[in-house]
Amino acid sequence: MRFVRFAALKLVLAFGLLLTFSMAHAGYPLTVEHAQGSVTLEQAPTRVAVFDLATLDTLDALGVEVAGVPEQAGPAHLKKFQDAKYAKVGTLFEPDYAALQALQPDLIIIAGRSRTAYDKLAELAPTIDLTLSPESFVGGVRTNLQLLGSIFDKQQQAEQLDAELQEALARVQRQSRGLSSVTLFTINGRIMTHAPGERFGMLYELLGTESTATAGEAATPGQARPEAGSPEAKKLQEAQRARLDQALAQQPDWLVVLDRGAATGGEGQAADTLGQDTAVAATDAWKQGKVYYLDPAAWYTATGGYQSLMETLQEFGGKL
C-alpha cells in the first residue's frame, strides 16, 4: 500500500508538471525543471546534443532537428541518425567530451544510462535529465513530451501527439480490460520476469493488463551484481526462477517478451528459449500463441520514446 501511495503521488506530480507546461508558451529566458534540478535557457536551443534515444525518438516525432547523437543506432525508425551529418558525441553511457567541445551545443539532454555524467556535462552547456520512472511511466512520457514542446516552441505539435497517445492508450486498454500478462526478459538462455515497479514493469501500465508477477526483493542502491558462479549469484537465480514459476502458474492471458540478445543487433533467441522451458510451454498463453514480442531495440535502448510507444500500442492492440 505504501508503494501504491508513493507511485500515485509521483503520477500526480508528473501530471501537475505536464499541465504547467501545456499551459505555458516558450518565452525566454525559460527555466526548466528536470530530474537533477533546474536550468535556465536564455534562448531557444539550436544545437542540441542528445544522449537518450527515447528523447531522440520523441524529438523526431515533434519535428525537432538535433546536432549531436550517441553512436548507438537504436530502433529502425531512428537509423537516419547514423548519417554523418549528425555529430557522434559518445555512447549511451560515455560522452565524448572532445566531440562535445567541438560541437559547442547550447543544450544537452540526458537520461537513464547517461545521467551519472550530469555534473561534468553541465559545465559544458545547459543540461537537462529526462529520466523516466517505472512507477509513473505514462505520466513521465507525457510530461517530457510537453516539456520538449515548450522548449522548442512545438506546443501545438506536442498537444496533438499527446492527444493521439491518450486515444491509443484508451483504445488498447478497453480491449485488454480484465486480461492478465507477465513480462518476460530473455538473455543467454535465461528467463526473468519483471513486475510492476521494476525496470520493465511499466508495460502493465501501458498495455492495461494485470500482472501475474510479484515484485522481488529490491536491491540496495549501488549494490553490485553478484559474481557469476558465486553462492550469491546462485541464490539470486533461484529466487528469479521461483518468481517466474509462480507468475506462470497463475496462467497469464499474455506473455510479453523482451529479447535482450536481439536488442543491440545480436541474434534473437527468445522463441527458442521460451519453447524449451517446460513451465512456459505448459501455459495456455504459449499453447494458444498469445505471445507478444516487443521491438527489442525500441524497448531496451529507447524505452519511453513516443514513436516506439505508439508502435507498441498499435501492434499489441492488433493482437487482442
Image (cartoon, rainbow, N blue to C red):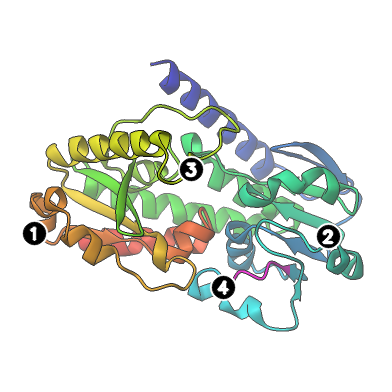
Q: Secondary structure at mark 2?
A: loop
Q: Which amino acid type is marked by label 4?
A: Leu
**Cα gap from disc 4 to disc 3, whole angstroms:** 35 Å
**Cα gap from disc 2 to disc 3, whole angstroms:** 44 Å
Was residue 70 drawn as part of the magenta stretch in this picture?
Answer: yes
Q: Which residue is most to the top?
A: 2
Mark 3 or mark 2, which is nearer the start of the sequence?
A: 2
**Cα gap from disc 1 to disc 3, whole angstroms:** 38 Å
Q: Which residues are magenta?
A: 69-73
**Cα gap from disc 4 to disc 2, whole angstroms:** 21 Å
Instruction: Look at 19% across and 39% down and name the residue there.
Output: 245
Residue tagged 3: 227
**Cα gap from disc 1 to disc 4, whole angstroms:** 33 Å
Instruction: Look at 68% across and 63% down and name the residue there.
Output: 91
Residue 139 in view of the camera:
yes
Q: Position of residue 146 (x, y in %)?
A: 63, 49
Q: Which amino acid type is marked by label 2?
A: Pro
Q: Which amino acid type is marked by label 1?
A: Gln
Mark 3 or mark 4, which is nearer the start of the sequence?
A: 4
- CB atoms at circles 4 and 3 under 8 Å apart? no
Residue tagged 2: 45
- CB atoms at circles 1 and 2 under 8 Å apart? no
Quadrant in which the C terminus appears: bottom left
Please tell me which residue lies in front, 171 or 318. Answer: 318
Residue tagged 1: 288
Mark 3 or mark 1, which is nearer the start of the sequence?
A: 3
Q: Nearer the viewer, mark 1 or mark 2?
A: 1
Was residue 7 drawn as part of the magenta stretch in this picture?
Answer: no
Q: Nearer the viewer, mark 4 or mark 3?
A: 3
Number of other residues with Cα within 10 Å of mark 3, as a class: few under 14, some 14 to 19, many 20 or more = few
- CB atoms at circles 1 and 4 under 8 Å apart? no
